[in-house]
Image: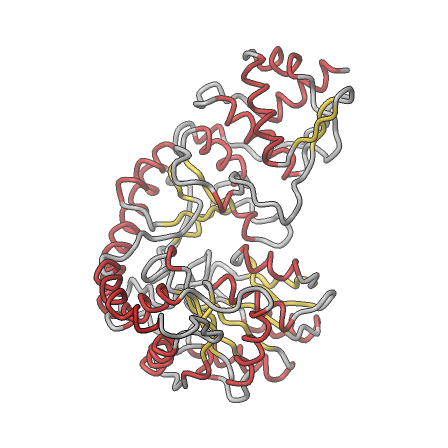
Amino acid sequence: MADGTAKGTAKGAGDRAEARPYYRALAEAVRGLVLDGRLAVGVRLPAERHLAEALGVSRTTVTAAYDRLREQGYLESRQGSGSRAALPDAGALGTDNPWLASDDDGLLPLHAAAPPATALLGEAIEEAGRAYHRYALGMGYHPAGLAPLREAIARRYGERGLPTRPEQILVTAGAQQAVHLLMSAFAGRGDPVLVESPTYPHAIDAARMRGARLVPVGVQEDGWHLDLVSCAMRQSAARLAYVIPDFQNPTGHLMADAGRAALVEAARRYGVTLIADESWAEIVLDETACAAPLAAFDTDGRVISVGSASKLWWGGLRVGWIRASAATVRRLAVLRAAVDIAGAVFEQLVVACLFERVEEARAERRRALGASCAALAAVLREELPGWAFTPPRGGGSLWVRLDGPVASSVAEAAAARGVRLAPGPWFGVDGTLERYLRLPFTQPPAVMEEAVRRIARDPAGYRPREPLTPTL
């Protein structure tokens, strides 16, 4: 019985002899089995000695892998009853959460589409430092955000064709907090919430934390089909929808003005509030790729916009914002105070300074990310010609269609080869999208070329996952 369990687990974990260190690859493989459902929660794992024999490795290696799985929450052990597969608590944030991987874990970080800091950051910090002392005279709490920053954000919306007053802006600790606040304000337990599929995973998490019922609408190879979106609104009776019309994450699609007008009209017809995530809106690679903000087509306050400093300037600033009606902003400020009274003054001052040079930052990103996108596309065509993609006109990633439903297998193999990837199922509601992989081009060209060449080793070895049924 123990021998059968060991063989089944070893078969599912796969041969990772080329991985270094091996214990980490083994832990990642077992973790993948649990997340896929191929190793059911509660199933007893083989003893360390038996698994070591089945894999042909030292017992020390298996012990280290099991220790790692316990730390991550994927293994529970009790003296006298062995170790069983488990899932960590939804709120537990271990260092091996794929979104929280450390910069020094030795893997090339192609799982997160996060650009490095802008070259303008240093000067903005110096400028903010010269003004900082003036704000120390007050109590330091600015619940809706620092006045100069709210004014700068409102002015930028005006430049993009959407007149906005500072009182319509709520500054948040990043776009993610903004989305969480909006889900908390507009979604309740059991409420249907419309989301794109694929979409930004943390928006899915925010809706699920509220107990909402997710209603996915597919974003097709050629973008949004507004008739499908309108039909989903009508049939689901959803009153809230989360959309990314600007260089959609992860597909990179840009919704045309006509589509935006149709989307807002459908929302008006069926009484839906739209959360428009504009985190990537300023990252334009093709200067002809332009569209008015979704809220520019709004006439009754049903479009709420979310923005971020992370993609244009730097994620470490942790500054985002919400644009809504003044009444909604006041309501959200009260809701936010239950968790976080106000944001840090200094970071807000830095972003206010950066807004003064927004066009310089956009040009910088266009040059750097444009070169990285071209390099990534070229090496993919050379090394993995069976993988299909359409280079986007903006944003920070390619949405790659693989030559089979093997995304999770590719991600596991890549981790063993020193590359951390984001497989398609991360971006779906129900674990589908195994034919897709998101590859960001926010790293320098040399990093991405090396990453793809590692991924391309033995591409014929990528196979759809087979169900694992351990013999107990």
Q: Locate the C terminus and report the quarter of the image it occupies.
A: top right
- Is 146 left or right of 197, judged from the image as shown? left
Which residue does the image show at 66% across and 75% down from the upper left? 239
Q: Position of residue 178 (x, y in %)?
A: 51, 67
- Is 365 left or right of 84, judged from the image as shown? left
The correct choice, above or below, for 115 with respect to 97 in the image is below
Q: Locate the N terminus and report the quarter of the image it occupies.
A: top right
Q: Position of residue 427 (x, y in %)?
A: 54, 52
Pick whichever, 396 or 74, lies toward us: 74
- Is 70 left or right of 363, judged from the image as shown? right
The correct choice, above or below, for 397 with respect to 378 in the image is below
Which residue does the image show at 34% across and 50% down from the upper left? 441
Which residue does the image show at 51% across and 76% down from the upper left? 304
Residue at the outermost front position: 137
Pick whichever, 156 or 405, lies toward us: 156
Quadrant of the rendered structure where residue 54 is? top right
Residue at the outermost bottom position: 299
Q: Position of residue 459 (x, y in %)?
A: 44, 31
Pick whichever, 90 or 300, lies toward us: 90
Colouring mode (rainbow / by chain / secondary structure / one colour): secondary structure
Q: Position of residue 183 (x, y in %)?
A: 61, 67
- Is 187 left or right of 297, judged from the image as shown? right
The correct choice, above or below, for 356 with respect to 176 in the image is below
Quadrant of the rendered structure where residue 165 is? bottom left
The correct choice, above or below, for 412 with respect to 11 in the image is below
Quadrant of the rendered structure where residue 80 is? top right
